[in-house]
Amino acid sequence: MSLYIGKPLVRVRALWQAAARETVLKKGPFVRVAASVLSLALLSACVSTANLDRLTPERDPYEKFNRSMWNVNQALDKVALKPVSSLYRAVTPKPARRGITRVFANLEEPWSFVNNLLQGKPKRALRNLGRFVVNSTVGVGGLADQASKIGIKNSPEDFGETLAAWGVKSGPYLVLPLLGPSTLRDAVGSGVAYFADPWHICLDKCTDLTWGEKFGIGAFQVVTMRSDATEAGADAFLESSLDPYAAARSAWFQSRRAAIRNDDGLGATPTGGGASDGMDATGDAALDAAVADLKENADGGNAATETEEKKAAPGAAPTPAPATAPQPPETTPDTAPDTPPAPQPEAPPGPR
């Protein structure tokens, strides 16, 4: 399933981030300059698509290509990613899965810190810094979300949101091979994250891990995100949709809009501790908010359907009419009963 509607592309970037970084760095300055030129070209393309920043059909001008990529991604998910994530959920206890989700969420705090600073939001940046320090120490590397318990709210940001804050338009909707839903602006933001995210820089520079070990970490992160999406109800949502592609696109736009507007408080905190209505949190407030909103709409539709079914059920007892006291029949001169008049008493005889 390519429905990574929380933080698109960033969710799966670790799968090939290490290989991409090592390839560019080994190729020397020419490739770096080429990558920079490509990024600037994409940025200019984003800026030139101001009329595509509304929720209108024009935002998906490449729908034919996108639907093809959606089908490819769904097929790959069915044969590879979903079975692995299902096995992960089967063998890993729920508390352990929550802890692992928190660890990966904690590793994203430094990048959120950088992006909040770039957006001119120092208070939110301080939250990121505070959460990272508290959860990395007291929370044992992020296994426990102690920061939320002491009132430090989650403030996630990525470079796609930073570009939006700078006024860069979203550009057309895209479904990328393996990576799933995105827009031109978010694709550029994810490309920047490949090289600038402190977590990935440290993974490359601060460790002696081999390429295979780095790839394994990235693959494991993807599996956990896929598992979180299942627990959030994404699979059930798509299966119940008449057009899963359109439903995923709508949910993705809702999630990105909530993230750009910093609607952090609508969903559960990124502790993996559970959301309302029995759903588990995914570690992404925007994703939880979108899924909760979609679930609420679905519940409303189901309730209306059940009401109609009850009315049309065969053999259902009719609703009795309210009892009223019997009223005497109205009589009019035309409808008065034909009864003989009562006999009149005879007058007494007079004196003789």
Image (tube, helix red, strand yellow):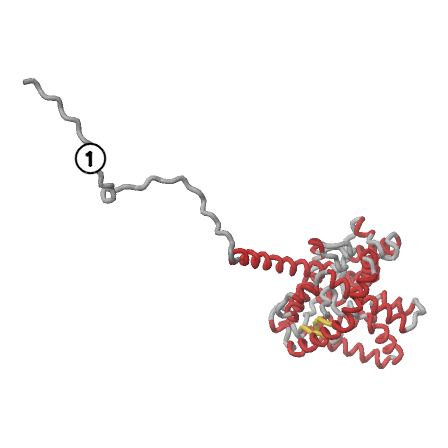
Q: Which residue lies furthest to the top in this view?
A: 351
- Position of 81 with respect to 28 (left or right) is left
SS category of the residue bearing label 1: loop
Whether residue 123 can be seen here: no
| Residue 309, placed above or below residue 187 | above
Specify few, some or many for label 1: CA neighbours under 10 Å numbering under 14, 14-19, or 20 or more.
Answer: few
The furthest residue to the right: 208
Residue 207 sits above or below residue 319 on the image: below
- Residue 347 lies, in percent from the top left, at 13, 24
Quadrant showing the N terminus: bottom right
Q: Which of 19 and 340 is in front in this view?
A: 340
Q: Which residue is drawn at 62% across and 60% down?
A: 298
Q: Which of 311 and 226 is in front in this view?
A: 311
On the image, the x and y values in percent for residue 257 come to 67, 63
Label 1, on which residue? Answer: 341
Residue at 75%, 74% in the rendered image: 76
